[in-house]
Amino acid sequence: MPDNELPPQQSPAIQAALSWLAAAPAADPLLDLVPLRTHVDALLEARLPPLQALKILELFQPRAGRVADAAKPLLLDAVLPLARRLRNVAQAMIEVHGAMAAGYLRGLRDADQAKLKGPQRHPTVLAHHALRNLAQQQEITALISGPAPVDMWARAQQAFHLRHPVNQIDPELPPENSPADRTLKGMLALAAAQPESMAPRESAFLARFLKRYGAAVEISPARPAVRPEEWLWLEETRDLPPVAMARRPPAEAGNLLYFRCTALGEMTREVITQIADGVAPAAMDLDDEVAYPDFLNVLRRAQERWASPPRRLFARHRHNYRVHVCANTGPLWQLLHGDLDPAQDAGLVSTDWMVLNERAGGFAMMHVAGGISGLVPGGIIGMRAAPDAQWSICLVRWARSDNPEHVEIGLELLAPSAEPVRIAPQGRGESNPLPALLLPPIPRMDRGESLLTARGVFRPGRFALISEPRDQVRVFQCNAMNIDIQTSSIEVFGFDRDPSPV
């Protein structure tokens, strides 16, 4: 019997897997998640002949894709800490895709190379299947602000090196047309864009964009001699995310891989320019979503990181002291306004965090105690070192969480204090003024006084600023000037006060 056909008898676990595959999929794809994970694990443990295992693995692929298509939309509005059900779904999907990638790599490594022929068994196709599953791992991890799954980067490099042994070029499928290479390039570009600094919908959009433009990434197994500051590197045995050469030099030995996103950054800059000039996304073979303001903002941030990998400008100083944090914008405004009692509402307005390190204008912190909800990159928090201290206003630059009890965030200090105010934009027709935080001028940042509001409030033009210090009500006519900071959650914009009477 040829070794690419299934024998009539298999272990009970394999027979159960085949029976499950033969049955109709569940009406709700998520109901297939648990049996999918069980049967994929059983396949890897069975140690079937490589080609037989690959044939069964390929039968699992459509089911895995169907479950992923149903699961990922549930994570687009995820906040930290992640709800238990969503975390269980995400973790199960990460494990399924990791196991499937491992299965493809095992087949690619152990099978008789003479028998890896044809459109379904070609080494490039198997490498692509492995990388496609690893890319799914990466995307799901980005949606939940999690750390890179164990072995993800090591397996991605294994797939590349198995696909390109000693840099040989396969004449049957040139690498420039290889879906495997394009998938790996998309993974590398997404990592270089730092998805931990993006809200889930932003990272999901960027992953879609890279399916169209990610092929522009340049990969090299040789250490670059020209413009090394543009390059990033990985080392297979370290299983760590890419590192910019400008931040840390590569290891002297090992199976290293180098890449740069300079051309991708230039192409992205051209996309942004054309959209600003009124060119329709469809004319560039892109979806209309590319022109949405939030997603254009994502492209601008990613383009900067692709064009020039950021280097560490300030030294980080390790610390180990606790601070109080108000992690929700609404309660923070109410607390500053005097609507909440810090003693009675302590569980709502304040939680304990540990500062891990500090640099000029920023912090990295870890949650210690107290309930938290609603954390997302691009949001804001209030922070103070003592109960009698003022609340500093900070922007959440990145967030990480590998379990519900462990959350880390990186912060940028926006202002050492803030005043709760209300604003009433003219011509908007709102029945009530909108809450905002008035941030004081910061000369060292060349920023005058500014307003922090929810996303979408800013409009150039006149508005009324309502201040209520010490039970007084003061109204100022102002002109909104320009946006200084804009994320998926908040806006910070400058304004001028109009000296004319209200």
Image (cartoon, rainbow, N blue to C red):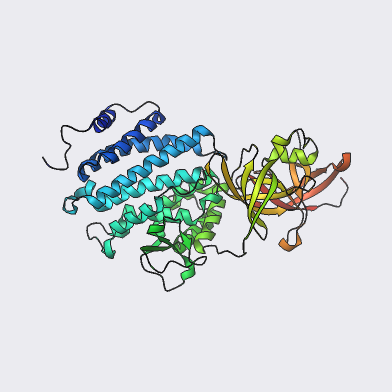
Examine the image and state in which quarter residue 257 appears: bottom left
- Most extreme residue toward the bottom is 225
What count of labels does the image hold? 0
Tell me: residue 342, above or below residue 241: above
Q: Please give the name of the residue rendered at 24% of the width and 60% of the height, measured from the top-left corner.
A: 170
Tell which of 495 and 405 is nearer to you.
405
Q: Is residue 246 above or below residue 136?
A: below
Task: Pinpoint residue 69: horizontal percent, then vertical percent.
Answer: 41, 37
Question: Where residue 290 sits in the image (x, y, percent)?
Answer: 50, 48
User: Considering the image in quadrants, where does the N terminus appear?
Assistant: top left
Instruction: Judge from the rendering whether residue 43 lies leftward or rightward of residue 151; answer left or right.
Output: left
Res. 434 in view: no
Q: Give the percent coordinates (x, y) of residue 435.
A: 74, 40
Nearer to me, 454 or 375 = 375
| Residue 316 visible within the image | yes
Most distant residue in the left direction: 1
Q: Is residue 55 above or below residue 272?
A: above
The image quarter containing residue 58 is top left
Left or right: 444, with 396 as reference point:
right
Question: Residue 38: horizontal and vertical position, in percent?
Answer: 34, 34
| Image quarter (top left, top right, bottom left or bottom right) of the C terminus | top right
Q: Specify whether 394 is left or right of 288.
A: right
